[in-house]
């Protein structure tokens, strides 16, 4: 079935890159391109594997497995680093995926070299060179927490669990809406996802906001997920324009409420800061110390 494509130059279309557009604030993931090549290039080992003796077959297939595992770890490591860099407060990844991927790349190349040559010196060169080049090409994992000084780790862990569950609801929404086969509806869902993630980042930066935002991260997102799944199922069968209009109106309401909650949390955080500043100035005055001039 043909799909309608929306965009800046289509009828009734809007640019995806304008202010408030779907792609505002999004960055292209680096987990593609070169990473995809890591899954393709090792496949050349299949030919020598099945033209070798049983020992060579086992060694080549083991090397292939190590290289494919290294490719998968590289991709997961890049995604983990992108999530780390997107947050002002972040824990370092528990598993240094890219470092392990470099080691596995070296092992895989070394094993392939041993299977083809049978010696020890050349495979060792392959292993060291492969591991070093992989590290230069893709870097290493973040090795320390970011912005965690003075942060309540218990509260931070609670927020991390809540955000993780909320992200699952968003993933279900984006997966389900594809069944509707409407690009403009997918774009609206993507816009809501970005708005919801802005709220997530606000709560992560101040875990005290979790109580005020908990319903948004759980109840409201569960409702949005269920409504999206039901809409995709119904609309894919009948393509009723009224059903589509009702669902888009729901998305508008959800996005407006999430944006309003985010703004309120940010105002409350600023109010808390102003109160702390005034309290500190009062204490300095009581101690006979001069309050610093904010203009200087």
Image: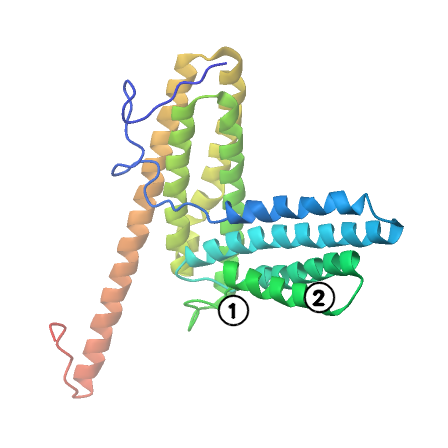
Marks 2, 1: nearer the viewer: 2
Residue underneath mark 1: 143
288 or 227, nearer to the observer: 227
* Secondary structure under the numbered disc 2 in the rendered image: helix
Residue 221 drawn at (x, y percent): 47, 38
Density class for disc 2 (Cα within 10 Å; few <14, some 14-19, many ≥20) is: few
251 or 71, nearer to the observer: 71
Residue underneath mark 2: 122
Please give the name of the residue rendered at 44% of the width and 18% of the height, measured from the top-left corner.
Answer: 3
Q: Is residue 123 above or below residue 194?
A: below
Q: Is residue 185 above or below residue 196?
A: above
Residue 252 drawn at (x, y percent): 34, 30
* Secondary structure under the numbered disc 1 in the rendered image: loop
Toward which corner of the image does residue 296 lie, by quadrant?
bottom left
Please give the name of the residue rendered at 78% of the width and 66% of the height, measured from the top-left corner.
Answer: 119
Image label count: 2
Which colour scheme appears in the figure?
Answer: rainbow
Q: Is residue 281 above or below residue 193?
A: below
Please give the name of the residue rendered at 56% of the width and 45% of the height, measured from the top-left corner.
Answer: 36
Residue 286 drawn at (x, y percent): 19, 84
Residue 105 drawn at (x, y percent): 65, 59
101 or 170, nearer to the observer: 101
Q: CA distance from mark 2 to mark 1?
A: 32 Å
Toward which corner of the image does residue 256 lie, by quadrant?
top left
Density class for disc 1 (Cα within 10 Å; few <14, some 14-19, many ≥20) is: few
Does residue 274 appear to the left or right of 172 in the view shown? left
Q: Is residue 119 above or below residue 72?
A: below
Q: N-terminal of the two: label 2 or label 1?
A: 2
174 or 134, nearer to the observer: 134
């Amino acid at each position: 079935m043909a799909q309608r494509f929306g965009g800046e130059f289509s009828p009734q279309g809007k640019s995806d890159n304008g202010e408030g557009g779907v792609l505002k604030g999004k960055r292209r993931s680096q987990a593609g391109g070169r990473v995809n090549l890591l899954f393709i290039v090792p496949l050349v080992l299949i030919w020598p594997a099945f033209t070798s003796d049983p020992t060579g077959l086992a060694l080549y297939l083991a090397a292939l497995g190590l290289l494919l595992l290294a490719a998968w770890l590289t991709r997961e490591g890049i995604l983990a680093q992108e999530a780390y860099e997107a947050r002002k407060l972040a824990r370092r990844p528990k598993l240094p995926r890219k470092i392990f991927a470099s080691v596995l790349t070296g092992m895989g190349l070394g094993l392939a070299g041993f299977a083809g040559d049978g010696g020890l010196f050349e495979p060792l060169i392959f292993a060291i060179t492969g591991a070093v080049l992989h590290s230069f090409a893709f870097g290493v994992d973040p090795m320390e927490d970011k912005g965690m000084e003075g942060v309540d780790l218990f509260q931070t862990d609670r927020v991390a669990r809540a955000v993780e569950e909320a992200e699952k609801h968003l993933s279900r929404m984006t997966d389900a809406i594809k069944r509707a086969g409407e690009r403009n509806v997918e774009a609206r869902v993507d816009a809501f996802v970005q708005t919801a993630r802005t709220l997530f980042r606000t709560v992560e930066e101040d875990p005290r906001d979790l109580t005020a935002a908990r319903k948004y991260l759980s109840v409201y997102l569960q409702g949005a997920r269920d409504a999206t799944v039901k809409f995709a199922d119904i609309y894919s069968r009948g393509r009723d324009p009224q059903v589509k209009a009702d669902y888009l109106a729901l998305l508008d309401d959800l996005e407006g409420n999430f944006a309003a909650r985010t703004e309120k949390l940010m105002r409350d955080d600023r109010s808390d800061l102003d109160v702390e500043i005034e309290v500190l100035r009062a204490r300095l005055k009581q101690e006979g110390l001069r309050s610093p001039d904010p203009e200087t």
